[in-house]
Amino acid sequence: MKNFLSLFILIAISSTAYAQALADDNISLMDSKWKTKEFYKDSKRVYINSFLVYCEVYREDKDTKQGGNVAFSKSVKGSASVVQTLGLSGIEATDLQRTANQLYTDFVNDIKHEGFEIVSTDEAGKTKTYEDWQLVTGPVVKDAGLPGVLSIVPEGYGYFIKGVDKKGADVKSSKLLKKLNNDGNNGAFSNIPGLSKDLDDAIVVDVQFSYLFTQEGDNWLRGNSAQVIVKTNFRLGSGTVSELNDSKSLVRLGGAETVSTINTYINFSKGKFSTGAEAALNVSPMKNIYINDVINSERITSSQSQNIVYPTSFNSYQVGNDFYTSVENRKSANSKWIEVDSKKYADGMYLAGSTFMKKVLEEFKSNN
């Protein structure tokens, strides 16, 4: 996986400009909020605690059907397993970086236009909250440490981490807080609820854009076959990402995958109570924001049937008083690479991201 992502980042392919469109321009928001009028009182300072852009570019799925005796029959079936790999090719890291840079610039300019001061990483780094933490700065396109996902850090932006885990993912919060939040770094339940106080009641903002191209399909009608079904659709929102994994502690039933959920949100919090923020606004898309004319929507299926045999004198043998039947265990693997126009992909990213961001900032400004 890491070798693939490293190679992916280095690849550059020429592209042509195209106009993009969203499948639905009417974007609805899902939010949780309280005391949001407090945002415009007293200190008019904003600290951008995180501003990350995630792009799913690779996916691996596995399904397994166990062998054994066939119910209500003397037949015996072998095990079957199938692995399906999907990946995107043709995307330039420079286009991803350019898009992340523009989204960040737009966000900062809009916040400043409201009369807010942006707190620098130099000031944040001197707080007790971030004592002994590491600063990560953009521009950079890197392995996110999530299955098949790239992380893009905008140019001119930096954020703090405790370190990196064995997968290369940023460590930003405790295990307990990761259980409270999907991304371990959200709004009122932030891993650093005291940061706002450390910065004289500055508004702390966490931003994450997650772009996905796959969606796991239902395979409950697979019968006597191992089957993987994945639907492709380019979108900004939330979903699961997946890759094969050898670690026994992370094995998911029915396969051998690491499965993670990534989300899209813009969260604001200010001040500190013992239970969290004094004021908060946490916003996500009500539903996924689909982007047209970049990746074809299709249903990709890979399957492997089980070998089912009826015991005969030719395929059975006896050991002591026990009879055994020889049956084949089957495995198969399929892969598909989807060629993507890099410029179209980046334009679609920006359109969806900026549209969502503008809607969120409109809601934030409505508290003035």
Image (cartoon, rainbow, N blue to C red):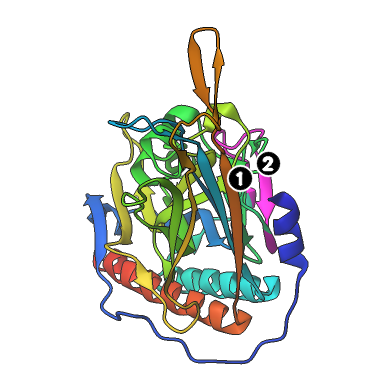
In percent of the image, x 36 and y 39: which residue is there? 189
Q: Do the numbered discs 1 and 2 sit on residues whose CB atoms are within 8 Å? A: yes
**Image x and y of residue 357, in percent:** 39, 70
Question: What label sits on residue 247 in the rendered view?
Answer: none
Of 75 and 298, nearer the camera is 75
Q: Amino acid at mark 2?
A: Gln
Q: Secondary structure at mark 1?
A: strand
Residue at numbered disc 1: 160
Rendering quarter of residue 283: bottom left
Which residue lies at the image location 57% right of the left edge and 69% below the top edge? 100
Task: Assess disc 1: are there few (<14), some (14-19) or many (≥20) residues with their C-alpha within 10 Å of its C-alpha.
Answer: many
Q: Earlier in the sequence, mark 1 or mark 2?
A: 2
Specify the farthest residue to the top: 320
Chain part drawn in magenta: 122-141
Give how far apart the Cα atoms at labels 1 and 2 are: 5 Å
Is residue 146 visible in this depiction of the protein? no
Q: Which residue is mark 2?
A: 134
Q: Is residue 153 above or below residue 342?
A: above
Between 40 and 131, the one nearer to me in the picture = 131
Instruction: Residue 268 in the image: state x and y as whole percent.
Output: 37, 53
Q: Which residue occupies the foreground of this view, 26 or 70?
A: 70
| 130 in the magenta segment | yes
Is 188 placed left or right of 245 in the picture?
left
- What is the quadrant of residue 14 in the picture? bottom right
User: Secondary structure under badge 2?
Assistant: strand
Of the 4 image quadrants, the one containing the C terminus is: bottom left
* Residue type, numbered disc 1: Phe
Residue 252 on the magenta segment: no
Q: Residues within 10 Å of mark 2 (few under 14, many from 20)?
A: some
